[in-house]
Amino acid sequence: MFELENECIKYAVIGDPVAHSVSPAMQNAGFMAAGLDERYGKYHVKPEDLAGFTEFARHNLYGFNATVPHKSALIPLLDEVAPAALAANSVNTVIVRNGKLYGDSTDGYGLESALQEAFGLEIAGSRIVMLGAGGAAQATAFEFVTRQAAQLTIINRTKSKAEALAAHLAGKSTALTALGNDETALIAAAVENSDVVIQATSAGLHENDAPPLELELLKNAPAVFDMIYKNTAVLQYARSHNIPCADGRGMLLHQGAKSFSLWTQRPAPLAAMRSALDMALNK
Ligand code: NAP
């Protein structure tokens, strides 16, 4: 059912949808800058075809990335999964070695590196407010407790999902709080007493999306990171209030760089990957 577009394709991103993905532009710039002949493609894989794709990959690829909606569904189809990815219930990187499929997650590393780069923020000891409790929040929140953040406040439209994520993360040194996005007084206090607010909802993906919460609640935020790599309402608000802010491209870059290193056992050519990413996103 799946075919190689050409013989050089040894890596790929899969998703449903996937046409919008800029990972091929970024990864191919990396392979070229590293002097490697392999290339990176994209496959539109529907949920019902995921098992078929993993078998195709086992025999034809050296590795692949997975995006929405495959990050959790992939796990039972793999031979081995890194403990942290298993705990986060999310795999975005698969390494194929000797016919075996190994899963890992580089999203937490990507976010951590992007926060470091944008704000000089170290996770250990920091107070983090996360908007959203979906796949992206789940995949990355685990990194915060593993890296010993002091506090993590998870705010979600459906409060029960924030509570379930907080319960899943409990047991380490991070103090966890779950809030609904209508608990405005508690949100304002959490934002004011935080080191960074991370926007991890999908509100803002489309141009006229309403923001994920009342924007005035962000007025005392020390820094805002939006996982979306567009000019969202949250980022526009932060900029107009002189709040240091960054969009999600740093996260995309660093998660991709870590995948590159896991596959090739080499450091990723970050500068080449960054400029290819900027070019693809600014098109
Ligand atoms: P998801 O699993 O579908 O979760 C969506 C989240 O957004 C849920 O928490 C949902 O709340 C919330 N939400 C949706 N619409 C909302 C609204 N109108 N108001 C308030 N909350 C709303 O999606 P995901 O996989 O977590 O992805 C979230 C975002 O992260 C996407 O935009 C994706 O592009 C981005 N992302 C970026 C990177 C990167 O490298 N930069 C990596 C991964 C993901 P409910 O639970 O109440 O429905």
Image (spheres, rainbow, N blue to C red):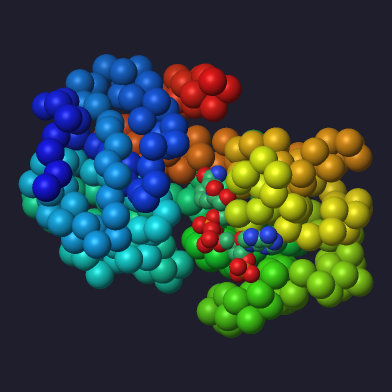
Q: Is residue 249 left or right of residue 32?
A: right
Residue 208 image position (x, y, % from top left):
70, 44
x then y, percent, for residue 199: 68, 53
Left-right relation of 176 to 44: right
Within the image, what quadrant is residue 156 found in?
A: bottom right
Residue 197 in sight: yes
108, 163: nearer the viewer: 163
Give the residue at x 50% y 35%.
253
Q: Quadrant of ligand 1?
A: bottom right
Taking the view exactly as shown, the residue that stands out farthest to the front is: 208
Look at 14% across and 34% down and name the residue there.
Answer: 4
Residue 59 horizontal side relative to residue 249, left or right: left
Residue 38 screen position, x and y as percent: 21, 26
Q: As displayed, is residue 138 above or below residue 248?
A: below
Given residues 160 and 256, the one toward you in this image is 160
Q: Looking at the image, which residue is at 30% across and 44% down?
A: 44
Q: How many marks?
A: 0
Q: Quadrant of residue 124?
A: bottom right
Q: Nearer the viewer, residue 118 or 233?
A: 233
Please determine whether, in this image, residue 269 is positioned above or below residue 259: above
Q: Position of residue 275 (x, y in %)?
A: 51, 20
Quarter of the image for the C terminus: give it.
top right
Answer yes or no: is residue 78 visible.
Answer: no
